[in-house]
Amino acid sequence: MADRFYSVILGEHLPEQVTEGSSTSSEAIELRVADSIYASKIDVILGVKALLSYLETTETSPVA
């Protein structure tokens, strides 16, 4: 199984606008999920929630 890439372009905010692929799309916002964890959907979701929480509470604006 290969890594999965999820991306959106600037201004896209809806789930149906997310692009999923097996290689990078080089979009402004992209998440790579390694094939070693992809089989565990809950672990991916928990990791993404941790990233979101970090960006909401710690990261300065603009994101560097």
Image (cartoon, grey):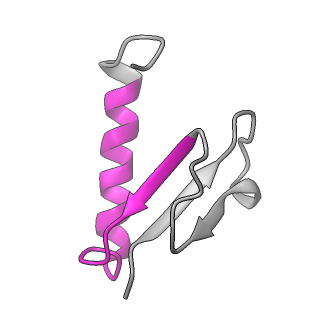
The vertical placement of 32 against 54, above or below, is: below
Magenta run includes residue 9: no
Instruction: Please give the name of the residue rendered at 75% of the width and 34% of the height, measured from the top-left corner.
Output: 11
Q: Position of residue 53 (x, y in %)?
A: 35, 33
Q: Nearer the viewer, residue 40 or 18?
A: 18
Give the quarter of the figure containing the C terminus.
top left
Magenta run includes residue 46: yes
Q: Position of residue 44 (x, y in %)?
A: 35, 64
Residue furthest to the bottom in view is: 1
Residue furthest to the left in view is: 36
Q: Nearer the viewer, residue 50 or 38?
A: 38
Q: Position of residue 60 (x, y in %)?
A: 38, 11
Instruction: Please give the name of the residue rendered at 67% of the width and 57% of the height, measured from the top-left corner.
Output: 18
Q: Position of residue 17 (x, y in %)?
A: 75, 55
Q: Quadrant of residue 20?
A: bottom right
- What are the residue bounds of the magenta stretch? 29-55
Give the quarter of the figure containing the N terminus.
bottom left
Left or right: 22 in relation to 38: right
Instruction: Please give the name of the residue rendered at 34% of the width and 20% of the height, measured from the top-left corner.
Output: 57
The vertical placement of 4 against 50, above or below, is: below
Left or right: 10 in relation to 64: right
Q: Nearer the viewer, residue 2 or 45?
A: 2
Residue furthest to the top in view is: 61
